[in-house]
Amino acid sequence: MLKTGVIGAGGWGTALSMVLAENHQQTLLWTRSEEIAHEINSNNTNHVFLPDVTIPSTVRATIDPTDLADADIIVLAVPTQYIRSILTTYSFSLKGKIIVSGAKGIERSSLLRVSEILSDVANITIDKFAVLTGPSHAEEVARKMPTTVVSASSSSAVAHAVQKAFTTSTFRVYSSNDVIGAELGGALKNVIAIAAGIIDGVNMGDNTKAALITRGLAEMTRFGTALGANPHTFSGLSGLGDLFVTCNSRHSRNRRVGEQIGAGKSLAEILTETQTVAEGVSTSESAYQLSKKHGVEMPIVEQVYRIIFDGKPPRKAISELMTRRAKPEQW
């Protein structure tokens, strides 16, 4: 039986540790917070990130990175922008292990995907890496609502090992060999979800939201293909599936950030009112810069970037999208 460890005790890390605990005798969940570790071990709860959820006793929390040293699979469940600092600050033993990314973002400044960050910081080779992604809000996964995701790795053995480790009666895992597509799908859908929230915030309708999701998916596919992804990946769980749920769900932090922006709040106000991270905020900047670097048109991503970082009025951004030069649907 494989030994499993999870780095990061936010909502997603806690939910994934609960999934793993169904298949394994014990899962170790690492957190920087002594308070959260104590609460999980004493009360089987994590009220800050997963209120009203009972965590199984087979999930044990620790603040000591060395406790994960003998794990066969390590799940990285911290926001993308913190991965580099976490791995350089704490002494995790990652060599030879299967590393599973649960993060959905692109690092600012370096413009690296999570697999590339791990290669840069910890010399993790791509054949030991998998990304676990898809339409999967932690709040629902923890409550065992039926969920399907995809395990993507360049190694079929690793993809299948992760698939086996996570699959339960309520958490179904498919496999894929398209790491680039799976990573980009998970990251870019957060930017489109912010745009979806903005539409909600300015009280536009279903027609507008449907147009955004459809054209947002076209941008994701066009961009991913330019970077080496399989375009079919974006029609699957890590693309359309994740995009749909993140643009529409009440659980979506990215959609909620956009909704508040659309209603007139500043980003600074929004970020001071929440303890959770909306990955799409940073990814909008990274994706915009990458699109310019690779010469890929991403008009929705660009307008989200302009709204967040340049203070562009949302209605003006929407108007500019609607009055762009006419194009064929496939371009």
Image (cartoon, rainbow, N blue to C red):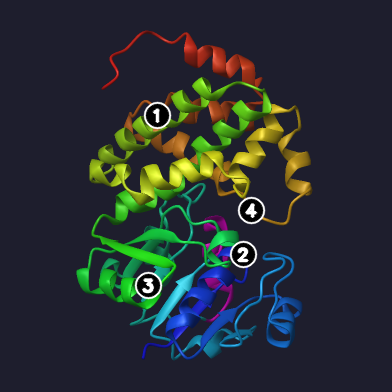
In the rendered image, residue 205, in percent from the top left (x then y), is placed at: 58, 22
Query: Mark 4 against mark 3, which lies toward the viewer?
Result: 3
Quarter of the image for residue 295 reads top left
Q: Identify the residue shown where x is 37% and y is 62%.
A: 131
- Cα separation, mark 2 vs mark 3, equals 19 Å
The answer to which of marks 4 and 3 sits earlier in the sequence is 3
Residue 186 on image: x %, y %: 43, 50
Residue 22 magenta-drawn?
A: no
Viewer-nearest residue: 284 or 170? 170
Find residue 167 and name its label: 3
Q: Which of marks 1 and 3 is nearer the N terminus?
A: 3
Residue type beneath disc 4: Val
The reply to whether the C-beta atoms of the residues labelled 4 and 3 are less than 8 Å apart is: no
Disc 4 target residue = 277
Badge 3, how many Cα within 10 Å: few under 14, some, many 20+?
some
Q: Badge 4 local density, few (<14 within 10 Å), some, or many (20+)? A: some
Q: Is residue 87 magenta?
A: yes
- Cα–Cα gap, marks 4 and 3: 26 Å
Q: Which mark is on residue 11?
A: 2
Residues in magenta, as a range: 78-91
Q: Nearer the viewer, mark 2 or mark 3?
A: 3
Alpha carbon separation for disc pair 1 and 2: 29 Å
* Main secondary structure along the magenta-highlighted residues: helix
Mark before the other along the chain sequence, 4 or 2: 2
- Let me know if residue 234 appears in the view: yes
Q: Tell whether label 1 touches label 4 (CB within 8 Å).
A: no
Residue 60: image x %, image y %? Answer: 60, 86
Among the 4 quarters of the image, the one containing residue 235: top left
Are the residues tagged 2 and 3 within 8 Å (C-beta)?
no
Residue drawn at point x = 45 percent, y = 23 percent: 211
